[in-house]
Amino acid sequence: MISRISLYLVLLPFMLMPVKPASGQSSAEITVVTRSDGRAFVYHDQMIPLSQGYHVSRSIAGGPWQQLTESPVLPVQSGPRLQQELGRRFDLLRDFSDRNDPQSIFLRLRSPSTESLLLAFSMPDLALAMGYLFVDDDAPLGQRVQYRFELTDDLGRPTGVSFSGEAVLEPVTPPAPTRVTASNQNRMITLNWQYPRPGSAGTEHVIYFMPRFSRVGSDRVITPDQQFQLRTTSTTFRQTFQVPQTGSEYEFWVEAIDYSGRSSLPSERVRIRVADNVPPPPVTSVSGRATSRFHSEISWPVSTAIDVAGYHVYRSTAQDTVFTRITTDLIPPLATSFVDTETIPGTQYRYQVRVLDTLGNESGPSNSAHVLIVDYVRPPAPVGLSSAFDRGTEQIVLNWEAGSPETNLRSYRILRRQVNPPSGRAFTQLNESAYLDISFRDKGISTLGFEEGVTYEYAVLAISASGNISDTTKTRVQVPVLTAPEPPGSVRAQAGNHNRISVSWSPSSSQSVTSYNVYRKQAGTENLQLLRSANRGNRFYRDEELPADVQFRYAVTAVDSVGNESPALLSDMVQVRRSAPPVPAFNVQAVVNAEAGAVVITWQSREENEMLGGFRIYRSTIATGTYELVGEASSAERRFADEGAGPGGWYRVFPVDHTGRKARQARAVQAVIRTR
């Protein structure tokens, strides 16, 4: 569609003056554009009053006047009518007005302005509708003719106002634009071209330019969004638009269009391959620092570009304004740091990072990161630091090696702190004067030795002759515990619901304890069964799914960091008691086994074997009679044979717990002979 129309001083011979309303004998300007198809487009610059029209007459070579119109030509009288006349092309006018409704656009077009007339002359169908254009469909080509416009009132009567003009009807094809160039940023195309200045031969009636393009290998010609570029007094022109997609080769050209809509010959065609050449956005927040080896380390955030391929780093000095690339290989997308090892101490450097995408497009520069390489060296940190407790001397021995051959070492600094149990975060310096050896013996706090089980952390760092301090090397050592810890202060075991026993205990008084072991012993046995090893902060254990009515004792021991275990402290005897009688048996069957001479009773139970004391089997001669005990079965059995019994008897099976309580109910089943 038409982009927002930029109005300039343009080419129409009568465009330097505003549109003139018709009144009396007018000095109107008439311009005639002749086409080779025998039509003449006769334009004038008079605004026809509303409700008036005009007749057009023609005189050939000074001969008699011939009226070309049978009835007056009536311009449109309203915005809705103009919209109806133009159809879909009416949408091209909406950018011309600051309002969107048809009547506002119509009134704007009728305003006495150069802009409204310019717009009308750029669209022949609009000029026809507004009354600025008459088309002579049978023009005498090659002849000098005069055209006269006579205005009429709303009844078709002459108003006395007329104006005329003459021209030689020679078709002239406008020259094509020249020196066309094309460039792109991704899908956005920029066309540049040249055209002669206004007044040049053959260009008098050219009013705008139309760019066109086609994909190489396709016959389809595309006009970009129906845009056009109005002609100005300049000789150079530019227009931007988008092609459908990248990754294809296109041909571009430009045509000049005159008032009648006639196109010039196409300009020379320019062929380019439209690729994604828009560089990714530059990274920000690039920072730099000087390393201990007189190098610069540059860091930056990960690029947000979707198609990022990597990074290049550029460098400049404080005295040089030109940045030079110092990376040979592309840095991977997720590697967001670079160390410049080609640095000189005492130099101020500036660094920039550029992003490259997968098509090789490079972003603009990032912010500059400044790094000053100061002329000093931090000594290397000691390496291989080890610590061990010497049982013979009861001292802690430290050993390490120098980080590298060091010629300007002033001293090592040896530090210690207690970390378990914690005793603050600060270190204590152990050497008061310069120390150059690579081993050290710590005799303990105030030479009183070390407490068993305590863990210490040691740190050793190097100090150069200039006072620069190395990184810190650390190690930890625990003083071994030779004495078993004290047991817990008390152990308590308490039975709860759902066959559980909760065991809790108070802490040991020994500081070296790292864990507790929980044991269980069943009444009548001597062995302790290890249930769990808990860390020193957890002094509770729940023993679950225990058999009912069985007595247990629990024991807890304290364990130190080297595995020394205290004596066991036992709880009182405790047992889990059932709160309800056993659940009745189910699927009870009594079948006569004639060969064995017995009735075999089978059943199933919903409780685990260890929860039961066994089963009792009862018999009666009738279902509702008195039942007598005929036998018992263990908790693991689900079968009983009543020897000597025959068919017809009735049986009930009762589960019994360890205390002898029976299930409250038992279904009576009759002994039967099962036939196959």
Image (cartoon, rainbow, N blue to C red):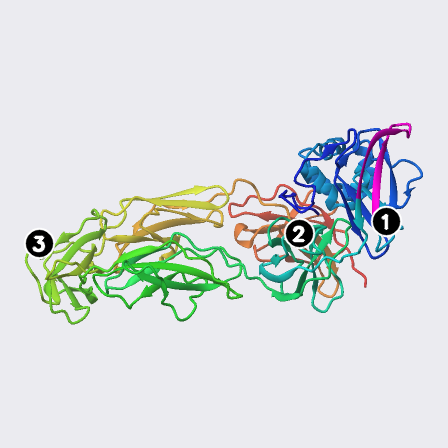
Taking depth in this image into account, of 94 and 141 the one nearest to the observer is: 141
Q: Which quadrant of the figure has residue 349? A: bottom left
Q: Which mark is residue 448?
A: 3
Taking 3 as reference, is 185 left or right? left
Q: In the picture shown, does residue 274 fall above or below 113?
A: below
- Residue 603 location, x and y as percent? 66, 54
- Is residue 429 shown in magenta? no
Q: Is tag 1's residue or tag 2's residue first in the polypeptide sequence?
A: 1
Tell me residue 278's x, y (percent): 54, 59
Give the Cα separation between the discs numbered 1 and 2.
Answer: 26 Å
From the viewer's perspective, tell me whether residue 589 is left or right of residue 416: right
Identify the magenta region: 145-165
Name the spot of residue 15 as percent of width and height, x first: 68, 41
Q: Residue furthest left?
A: 433
Residue marked by disc 2: 199
Q: Dot 3 lies on which element?
A: loop
Residue at 9% from the left image edge and 58% from the top image edge: 443
Q: Can residue 575 be seen at all in this image of the molecule?
A: no
Give me the C-alpha separation between circle 3 and circle 2. 111 Å
